[in-house]
Amino acid sequence: MPYLRKISSEQWFMISALVVNAGNYIYNLILGRILGPKEFADAAILITFLLVLSFIAMTFQLATAKFSVLFEKATFTSFLKKSYTYALGVGVLLGVTIIVLSKNLQQILQTQSYMMFVLFGLGIPLYFIMSVNRGVLQGKKRFGKLAITYQTEMWSRLFLTLSLIVLFTNIASSTIVSVGIVGSLIFGLFPFAEEKISFKNVDNISSEDLVDVKIFFWLTAFYEFSQIIINNSDILLVKHYFESYDAGLYASLALIGRVVYFVAWMFVMLLLPKVVQLHKEGKPTTSVLSKYILYIGVLAFIIVVSCYLFPTLVVQLLFGDAYVSIAPLLWKYAIATSLFAISNIFAYYFLSLDNYIPVIFSALFGVIQIVLIVFFHENLQQVVFMQMYAMTLLLVFQLVYFFGVSRNK
């Protein structure tokens, strides 16, 4: 059809990202309905671990994406070799650590089985290889193939997990969820970027370029660590402080309220290579930031208003009557997530420009969020309020810094 040809690769990627987010949401919602709050609490831990893993591996993806734009020919080949080598090494190290500590994790997080952590650990190296591959596709703006890798991961996880739950009712649901996650990572490796990778002992990266790579990598890793704290610490702390039933209710709240963040992520995927390219060409970049902030702001407003006006209906439609007691907190949690999503756009924008001050802001308020929840967790509402306070302050700091930098320029 003629009008389909007018859709750009970036627009196709955004459409695909919406489908992937919808698929992941359906996956979580079905698990919540099938398992019930108590068993879903264990499944939510694995989903949270997967999100944590995605943030860690995102360091490799963003670094690969950025320097795929900046490096060419032999330099890029050497860089890619190093990326895959280090990614695999970190993946194996983290995987072994999770497996060794599996029984300790079972006790700390009050899960029914430690095997879920063992299986999860086996799949970690695959995620890091997958992330470097996605970084190449993202940096080279091959958004069609990049979209397919997300599609294959999402659909395979959905199909494998639900099929195994139906077929093997005598196996612990947490173990089945782990198997589904590991299987989906294998499918997520395809399509693989066609770049030639040379494993000869030839290093074509100059010392100056290598320093740039290391600085960007470690500061991005630091920022992703702050993302892990902000985006996942609440679920882990609730699982530690509260009973499984309450933890399951909170997990459903988090999954609904974070929809704005998951959708915002597709804009980050488009933002980074575009800002890097414009900066490389000496062109202004603030218009790109403004456009994406507007998109996220409108989306966040719609979601918060919907959660405020129809909280019970939203929870009933998505998770069922068993979770309806959490409905009054939905709009409040959505506000906290929306503030975080907008702050995140500012941070990645500055990260693309090699400005790392906003990274420090995110890490600082991530720690503040943890401290607040540790000291104030009498009930789930108090946990949500602590996040709202921390994320409001984070966005204020990001805005003040942005306008300060703009005024100086």
Image (cartoon, rainbow, N blue to C red):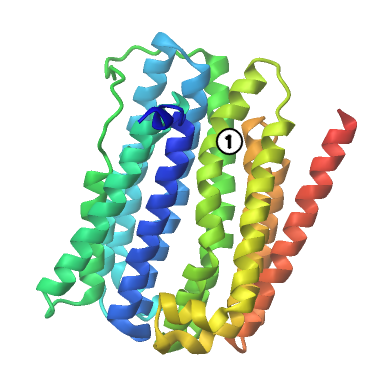
Which residue is at a point 69% across and 70% down the rendered structure image? 388
Q: In this view, does 141 lie to the left or right of 408?
A: left
Quadrant for the C terminus, please.
top right
Residue 218 appears in the figure: yes
Residue toward you, 115 or 394: 394
Q: Is residue 247 left or right of residue 32?
A: right
- The location of residue 312, given as percent across then percent down, is 53, 84
- Residue 109 found in image quarter: bottom left
Q: How many labels does the image show?
A: 1
Label 1 crowding class (10 Å Cα cut-off): few <14, some 14-19, many 20+?
Answer: many
Which residue is at a point 60% across and 88% down the rendered structure image? 379
> Identity of the amino acid at label 1?
Leu
- The location of residue 164, given as percent across then percent down, is 15, 68
Instruction: Residue under label 1, please give it.
Output: 271
Give the farthest residue toward the right. Answer: 407
- The location of residue 171, given as percent across then percent down, is 14, 76
- Residue 288 found in image quarter: top right
Q: In this view, does 351 lie to the left or right of 25?
A: right
Which residue is at a point 48% across and 79% down the rendered structure image? 315
Give the farthest residue toward the front. Answer: 2
- Tag 1 secondary structure: helix
Residue 122 appears in the figure: no
Residue 22, above or below 191: below
Which residue is at a point 73% across and 42% down the rendered structure image? 357
Residue toward you, 226 or 346: 346
Residue toward you, 275 or 377: 275
